[in-house]
Amino acid sequence: MVSSDIPANREWIADGQSGWLFPGGNPEALSKVLLKAAENEQNRQEVALRGRAIALARADSRKNFPRLLARIEALSKAAKAQMQ
């Protein structure tokens, strides 16, 4: 994956490891990153697999929704306890 280098994307992409980042609004940097990504098919496939693994681990709603629900319930209980 090639994406602009902003904080939200850095949470998902480690440059050169699970994708490639470039400074947003910089077409020359984007061109360089695209050429770098296209240079080596094996490296591109490895990077893609690492990126996919991160997405599966962190963006799977079946895994994460129960964790989110448990956190919301814990916060709700804590807020109720403070109100009493």
Image: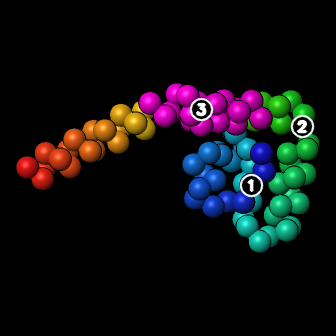
Q: Residues within 10 Å of mark 3 (few under 14, many from 20)?
A: few
Residue designated by label 3: 60
Q: Residue 6 at what x, y percent from top left?
A: 63, 61
Q: Residues within 10 Å of mark 2 (few under 14, many from 20)?
A: few
Q: Residue 32 at what x, y percent from top left?
A: 86, 58
Which numbered disc flags the more N-terminal residue, 1 or 3?
1
Q: Main secondary structure of the magenta part?
A: helix
Q: Cβ–Cβ below 8 Å for labels 3 and 2?
A: no
Q: CA distance from mark 3 to mark 2?
A: 29 Å
Question: At numbered mark 3, what does the secondary structure look like: helix, strand or loop?
Answer: loop
Residue at 77% across / 45% down in the picture?
1
Start-end of magenta stretch: 48-66
Front disc: 2 or 1: 1
| Residue in the foreground of this view, choosing between 41 and 83 | 83
Residue designated by label 1: 3
Which numbered disc flags the more N-terminal residue, 3 or 2?
2
Q: CA distance from mark 1 to mark 3?
A: 21 Å
Residue designated by label 2: 40
Residue at 59% across / 32% down in the picture?
60
Front disc: 3 or 2: 3
Residue at 70% across / 36% down in the picture?
51
